[in-house]
Image: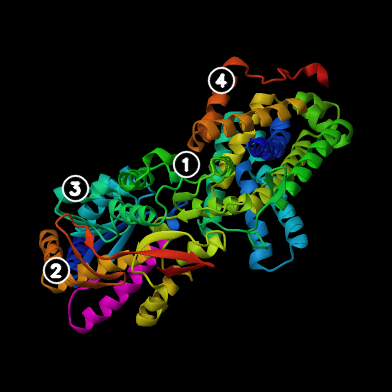
Amino acid sequence: MLQLVYNINISGITYLLITISFTTIYYPTKFFHIAHAITLTFSAYFTYLFAKQLYFPLYLSIPLAIISTTAVGMLSEIALYKPLRKRNASPMILMIASLGLYTVLQNVISMLWGDDTKSVRTGEIKVGNEFFGVYITDIQIITIAVCLALFAACVVFMKYSRIGRNIRAVASNPELSNIVGIPSDRVILWAFGIGSALAAVAGILIAFDTDMTPTMGFNWLLYGVVAMIIGGVGSNWGLVGGALLLATAQHLSAYYIGSQWMDAVAYIILILFLIAKPLGFSGKRLKKSEL
Amino acid sequence: MKFRVFFIVMILSAITSCKTDNKKQIEIGSIQQLTGQMSKYGKTLQAALLAEADIINEERKHNNLPLINITFEDDKLDPKTGINALQQLIQVKNIQICFGAQSSSVTLAMSPVANQNKVVLISSASGAPDISQAGDYVFRTCPSDVYEATICSEYYNTHHKGKSLAIVHTNNDYGVGLKEAFLKNIANLGNVNIFAFQQGQSDFKTILSKIKQQKTEVVYLIGYEEMIAVFKQATELGFTCQWLGNNQMNDPDIVRKFEKSANGTVFPGHQYDLEKIKSNHAEFYAKYMKYSGGVDLDVFAAYGIDALIAVNQALLNGAKTGEEVKNELYKMKNIQGFTGIFSFDENGDPIKTVGLYKIEDGKIIKL
């Protein structure tokens, strides 16, 4: 049973990092950046490219993969979303454009690296470290440490840094932000950069733990989005609750009903929250007065 | 006026060239998954068919016989897309023979169209029991799930009878079919726990924790590439049980990806010795590696070559139409394929020996 509790926590912590990365972009832009799923996937494949195909050491491959993935995320904002926003595209149009971008980039990955499972692991597969009957692998320990550290850093960054405050300002009212001298486009680009970098870290950690396929990002994004809807945008602790609730429901359903229900449970929770509590746990509606 | 004359000449020349092409070539279709997560098998099959067709065509050219031309279509693992692709090949290319599909669901969906149009349909990877009853024109060169699962259950009954058992299977026609065929033949139905998972799933930690908690001694695993994650996560959780596997493991590429995590796993499969194929069919393998981009031949691609060899033999025996090819396939005995000598039974299933194999240090060893 302790192993089950641990499994819930490791999934929950990974969902938390993905939901934070997604929320960072969603918060100021107010549209579903579906291509975020491919950002996550790209980071895994960039690591594979640098470490396994170009034989760079891991300490170099990982930062290079994060930088390249961040560039992909920021390029999508510069080349696609920003021009669409300039033409007053609605969030729905932006979401459809994002879906198109996701499909194109997923096919690019399939074309470049193939559809089969790829691995970035360097060592042999070995038995995890045992603590009180619970098996924990090295990469899972790293995942827990990295995700929690990035979560804490994001909370502090969004609250106290100038860029963080600007992102919150644009999220509250982009027009007014422009009037008071906060360039909303630049702030959104920053949000894409930070969100994509966080997704890159998540993608790399996932790839080290469960390998990679070109379609891996979509399910992880779904979990991140559901955790965000459960937790509510704008509340960090709400996101923690959302990620943990989703992971708990999924793993308990896998344990008691069957693992084929894990995705279905995520959708059921999503529907229930959309009907009963559309603003999530925090129930926080963004107010213009926040600025 | 000039334009009209030019237009008529163009149409006439197009018709004439079509006629000449038809005389020169035998059009064959091939429908498999060429995009998506499971497309690896579709792509290796495509490369294998192209390589073998090149060799067959060299012989045909030498003997002044019409050449074989294979047109490939992507079914995207979707039955409706498969049906559309087959109808299109029949109408546009006037095919009498079609290879495919790999997924049982797609083959079953295409079967009525093949039977109605008297087109021979030969699958190299559809294992569902229902394929046996899918009509006279439907054949396969891979074993039926029933046969594969029976061999596996016999192994369990002989070596592990009475031990606690878990079946971990992919939740589709293939996984459910194998699970049911396996369950029919095992001796201790009371001591079995069943776990299904979604195709493409990557997190198995919770079901594996439960299997370990239940002190399971034997696990029968049915899946595709997800098996890489299952073995890895089971090793990390300290599993020491006996694993039984499925014919999908008869693939050096996937076994290499298991590393040492699948050591000791026993699975049923046809004679498939990659090293032997490489040495006995060096010319084929060199061509195949060029088409596949360096991906090793898997067992399902080898079954595909068996299908092409059988079809070519039927054509050499004088069969021309789909009906004649069908009759010839039922008649032919001892076809020398890449996975052994085989014939087709009255259901279009292959009659050939299925053996047991074991995985040791990333290699497949015959038991």
Which chain does the residue under circle 4 lie in? Answer: A
Same chain under badges 1 and 2? The reply is: yes
The reply to whether the C-beta atoms of the residues labelled 1 and 3 are less than 8 Å apart is: no
What separation in Å lies between label 3 and label 2 (alpha carbons)? Answer: 20 Å
Find the magenta span and give its range: B43-69
Same chain under badges 3 and 2? The reply is: yes
Same chain under badges 1 and 3? The reply is: yes
Judging from the image, what secondary structure is the residue with disc 2 in?
Answer: loop
Q: Amino acid at mark 4?
A: Leu
Q: Residues within 10 Å of mark 2 (few under 14, many from 20)?
A: some
Q: Residues within 10 Å of mark 3 (few under 14, many from 20)?
A: some
Q: Is residue A285 above or below residue A13?
A: above
Which residue was labeled with disc 1? Answer: B198
Which residue was labeled with disc 3? Answer: B133
Pick the front one: B98 or B166:
B166
Q: Nearer the viewer, mark 4 or mark 3?
A: 3
Q: Which mark is residue B332?
A: 2
Magenta-drawn stretch contains B45: yes
Which chain does the residue under circle 3 lie in? Answer: B
Which residue was labeled with disc 4? Answer: A272
Q: Which residue corresponds to the image point at 17% horizontal and 81% vertical from the top-left?
A: B64
